[in-house]
């Protein structure tokens, strides 16, 4: 792309803008910490270290050199994790200098390896170690006698403060920083030149990687320290949020940084990202506006691009503001900001920005419930024309999502996703590959193909990043990752493997309430609700309705009706279901509409209105088949078969079950659906066999034996679910069936199990004939 700003989610740390020099201050090179680091490098070049330990120390050198000064405790702990023997040798050398005399420190510097002649050593002048030693030699040679004495006293304080309070590694550091500020190593005449040299060499790693998050702030950072800190934290927020600073700690660091330089634009942008983590709409909008204001005022864009840079900042500022409002559900404000961005982009003839605006325009139309197919198709065509594969792929994925909700067949949607996947792999668009896999998982799940959904979810969870800067690192901070994780957890919960759910929750960031965390919270609450409902613990399921409603009102209303229906408050449940159906028909939420119809039919059953429920079930079945929702279609057929059984046509009910329901339910259904399907099949077999509860009449022994086996299998499923109410129903039917077959011992056993469960539940059992 022509500019880094020509993306909705750009990283301002990658810009070539120049931050004002010396705003954050410069850091003196000779310090007690640098002497400790010199001792480490000296031991590395002089002593024999094993290859694995040397490899670990080599990886540690650059962060230690570039990072801020650490306390002695932190420094020794870091080195000890790599090579305990070397850490002990460094401790001894520092002990000799701190407990000796000034000449011991002088001798330490004169005894260091010479980087100009050590050709075969790691301290050669062109190596990382050699450059550091050369810089230290030059800085030390510039010190006057008083400065050398002050450095020696600082070294003593640095060493003894660690052993005075071993539990507190930060003791004495603020004082040391103050002393360093007094130790001016340059003359006023050459201050400018030396400061430029320092800025060129000073590219430190942020202190948060080498210290505790609770450590106090240590004053202003250097320019490159600040830049690296911001770039590092932005990178972690995007790729691995668990390793980034906590929101409060990061906010404190940014406030401290902005206190010394309020016009540091990149700090405001990171503040915006941090506010988004905790869903702070006010602070995120405030920081985003400040970022673009500072970007324009600093002249970074204008210097390189003239007036065009100023205009680009304005239109992308409006575009980012529109995306922010859209994320928080403020669609009217988002529309106003988007229209402003479109107007400025049209005036500047910026086609790339217009394509981003068009992408957000059809996104806003979708959120309003309007048909945005035409807009999306135009966006894909224009994005392909301007060679913007990212936007083209997003448009195709949006079309696939719309097609899934409109009832398109699976093979058409998968063909479209396959074409986009080729484009993703060609351009290594790992983020879009993740979205494609998550979308495929959702489509298979919606169509009721649990095995395919499970496969796609696991494929996404085991995929690593394809970005060059982050190659081979597993992404766990994206919305696609969270969607796949939620699907995986729900699929395992349906098969009663709840232990895996708790293990999956550890894979998501826990430090803040991000979109991924909200998705997981809703998924976890739904799993807990279904578990309590299956186990008949309605008093535990009822409080979860409030929590679910806070995250998703539609899901909360549906589950509130489920609880009211279970508590025999049919009138209230019916009222909620009717309101919910009207709402979902307006928003075109087909899945919820079908579920509401099934629940309404169950309410009709309670009043023996089986003929009234029949048209409703046929309508739900037509809707499910129209949208190719196999799972909901199977559940609807179960309800139809139960209605036919109650209307006195068990032969037709059994035929429907075997032809269109049993196979998909046993292959892809949840354990609860399998148990219900088998229980209904057994009841149909008993009815077809001519079984009578009072034992009168002659029953078909073949079907009766089949019913016994079917009930036994259904009992196994309900036992896995710990669904005692339905187990009670199964044992009741088993006892009657064994009695009619003359199997007294099995009858007594089933009767005893029924009696035990009935006493344990302490609630009157609803009529078996009134519940599926």
Image (spheres, grey):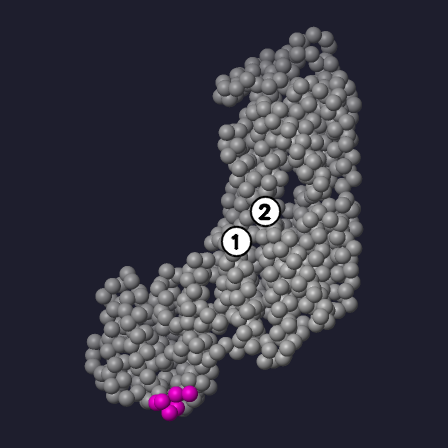
The picture quadrant where one finds residue 260 is bottom left
Q: Secondary structure at mark 2?
A: helix
Is 23 located above or below residue 741 in the figure?
Answer: below
**Residue name at image x 65 percent, y 31 percent:** 577
Q: Residue 328: where, in percent of width, then height?
A: 58, 52
Find out whether residue 622 is within the magenta segment: no
Magenta segment boundaries in residue numbering: 187-192
The percent coordinates of residue 603 (x first, y second) are: 66, 24
Report the residue marked by disc 1. Answer: 279
Q: Of 401 and 282, which appears nearest the observer?
A: 282
Residue at mark 2: 486
Q: Main secondary structure of the magenta part?
A: loop
In the rendering, at what x and y percent does residue 400 appear? 74, 52
Q: In terms of secondary structure, where does tag 1 sit?
A: loop
Quadrant that contains the C terminus: top right
* 144 shown above or below 15: below
Q: Count the marks: how many?
A: 2
């Amino acid at each position: 792309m022509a500019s880094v700003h020509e993306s909705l989610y750009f990283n301002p740390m990658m810009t070539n803008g120049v931050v004002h020099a010396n705003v954050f201050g410069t850091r003196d090179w000779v310090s007690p910490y640098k002497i400790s680091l010199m001792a480490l490098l000296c031991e590395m070049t002089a002593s024999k270290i094993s290859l694995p330990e040397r490899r670990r120390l080599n990886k540690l050198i650059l962060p230690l050199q570039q990072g801020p000064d650490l306390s002695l405790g932190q420094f020794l702990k870091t080195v000890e994790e790599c090579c305990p023997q070397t850490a002990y040798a460094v401790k001894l050398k520092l002990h000799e200098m701190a407990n000796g005399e000034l000449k011991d420190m002088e001798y330490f510097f004169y005894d260091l390896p010479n980087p100009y002649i050590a050709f075969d050593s790691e301290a050669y002048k062109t190596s990382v170690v050699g450059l550091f030693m050369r810089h230290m030699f030059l800085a030390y040679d510039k010190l006057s006698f008083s400065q050398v004495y002050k450095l020696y006293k600082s070294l003593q304080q640095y060493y003894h403060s660690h052993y005075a309070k071993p539990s507190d590694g930060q003791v004495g550091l603020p004082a040391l920083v103050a002393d360093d500020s007094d130790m001016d190593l340059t003359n006023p005449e050459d201050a400018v030149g030396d400061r430029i040299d320092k800025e060129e060499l000073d590219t430190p790693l942020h202190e948060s990687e080498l210290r505790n998050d609770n450590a106090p702030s240590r004053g202003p950072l250097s320019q490159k320290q600040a830049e690296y800190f911001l770039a590092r934290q932005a990178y972690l927020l995007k790729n691995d949020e668990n390793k980034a600073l906590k929101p409060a700690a990061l906010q404190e660091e940014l406030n401290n940084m902005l206190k010394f330089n309020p016009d540091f634009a990149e700090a405001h942008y990171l503040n915006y990202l941090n506010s988004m983590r905790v869903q702070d709409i006010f602070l995120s909008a405030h920081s985003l506006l400040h970022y673009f204001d500072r970007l324009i005022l600093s002249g970074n864009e204008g210097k390189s691009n003239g007036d065009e840079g100023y205009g680009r900042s304005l239109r992308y500022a409006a575009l980012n503001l529109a995306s922010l409002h859209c994320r928080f559900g403020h669609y009217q404000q988002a529309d106003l900001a988007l229209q402003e961005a479109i107007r400025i982009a049209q005036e500047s003839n910026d086609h790339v920005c217009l394509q981003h605006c068009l992408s957000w325009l059809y996104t806003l139309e979708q959120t309003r419930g309007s048909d945005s197919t035409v807009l999306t198709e135009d966006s894909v065509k224009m994005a392909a024309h301007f060679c913007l594969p990212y936007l083209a792929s997003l448009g195709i994925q949006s079309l696939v999502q719309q097609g899934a909700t409109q009832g398109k067949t699976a093979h058409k949607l998968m063909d479209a996703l396959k074409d986009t996947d080729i484009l993703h792999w060609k351009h290594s668009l790992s983020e879009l590959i993740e979205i494609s896999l998550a979308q495929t998982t959702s489509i298979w799940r919606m169509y009721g193909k649990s095995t395919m959904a499970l496969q796609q979810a696991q494929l996404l969870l085991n995929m690593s990043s394809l970005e060059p800067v982050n190659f081979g690192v597993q992404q766990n901070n994206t919305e696609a990752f969270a969607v796949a994780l939620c699907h995986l957890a729900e699929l395992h919960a349906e098969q009663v493997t709840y232990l895996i759910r708790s293990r999956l929750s550890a894979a998501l960031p826990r430090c803040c309430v991000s979109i991924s965390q909200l998705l997981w919270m809703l998924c976890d609450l739904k799993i807990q609700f279904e578990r309590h409902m299956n186990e008949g613990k309605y008093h535990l399921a009822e409080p979860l309705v409030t929590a679910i409603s806070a995250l998703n009102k539609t899901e909360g209303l549906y589950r509130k009706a489920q609880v009211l229906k279970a508590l025999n408050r049919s009138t209230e449940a019916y009222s909620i279901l009717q309101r919910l159906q009207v709402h979902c028909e307006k928003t075109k939420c087909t899945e919820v509409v079908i579920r509401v119809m099934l629940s309404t039919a169950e309410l009709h059953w309670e009043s023996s209105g089986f003929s009234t429920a029949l048209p409703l079930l046929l309508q739900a079945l037509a809707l499910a088949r129209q949208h190719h929702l196999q799972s909901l279609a199977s559940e609807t057929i179960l309800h139809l078969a139960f209605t036919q059984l109650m209307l006195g046509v068990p032969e037709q009910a059994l035929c429907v079950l075997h032809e269109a329901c049993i196979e998909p339910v046993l292959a892809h259904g949840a354990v609860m659906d399998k148990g219900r399907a088998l229980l209904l099949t057994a009841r149909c077999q008993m009815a077809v066999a001519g079984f009578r509860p009072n034992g009168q009449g002659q029953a078909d022994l073949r079907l009766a034996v089949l019913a016994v086996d079917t009930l036994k299998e259904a009992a196994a499923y309900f036992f896995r679910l710990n669904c005692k109410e339905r187990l009670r129903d199964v044992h009741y039917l088993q006892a009657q069936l064994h009695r009619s077959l003359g199997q007294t011992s099995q009858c007594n056993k089933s009767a005893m199990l029924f009696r035990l469960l009935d006493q344990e539940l302490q609630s009157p059992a609803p009529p078996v004939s009134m519940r599926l």
